[in-house]
Image (cartoon, rainbow, N blue to C red):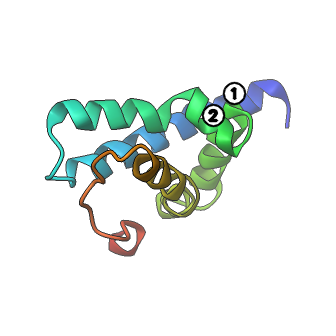
Amino acid sequence: MNEFHKRELAWIGDAVLALYVRTWLIEAKNLDMQQRADYFMRVTNNQFLTAFGEPTAVEAKIGKLFQEQNLSAAYQFIENSIIPVFIQQLKNKRLPLPDVPKSRTAQE
């Protein structure tokens, strides 16, 4: 995949990740708006995404899943790979955990 195509997929993947995280956090009724905004920034920033590889490549993978399969496939990747690491970081820092259903992809 050339760099231009990778960046196009990453642009889409960034939007899919943002959509997933925002809808996931909206369901977390135990968090106030400031906590939701903080958690959104934590999950979607490049520093966090480096835990999974080069951030543009991670977002490109999400974008590729969305384009080649569907939104549920991209959400499933986020839910199974990214969210568990984020939850573990919250536990390590003793921050409140989002009180949301276990699986969003099952609802799709």
Tell me whether the residue at label 2 lies in contact with that at label 1, contact meaning CB atoms closer than 8 angstroms.
yes
Q: Is residue 105 above or below residue 89?
A: below
Label 2: state its secondary structure: helix
| Dot 2 amino acid type | Ala
Q: Is residue 1 above or below residue 107?
A: above
Tell whether 9 sits left or right of 35: right
Q: Is residue 1 left or right of residue 77?
A: right
Q: Nearer the viewer, residue 22 or 16?
A: 22
Residue 10: mark: 2
> Residue pushed farthest right?
2
Query: Label 1, on which residue?
Result: 7
Give the residue at x 52% y 35%.
14
What is the crowding at mark 2: few (fewer than 14 residues within 10 Å), some, or many (at least 20)?
Answer: many
Picture coordinates of residue 100 (x, y %)?
A: 26, 62
Q: Looking at the picture, does residue 28 appear above or below residue 101?
A: above
Q: Identify whether 52 is placed above or below 75.
A: above
Q: Tell me the CA gap for discs 2 and 1.
A: 5 Å
Residue lying at 41% horizontally and 68% vertically, measured from the top left: 105
Q: Is residue 2 left or right of residue 53?
A: right
Give SS at disc 1: helix
Task: Decide which of 106, 27 is in the foreground and name it.
Answer: 27
- Residue at the spot 32% in from the left edge and 45% down from the top edge: 95
Residue 108, disc: none
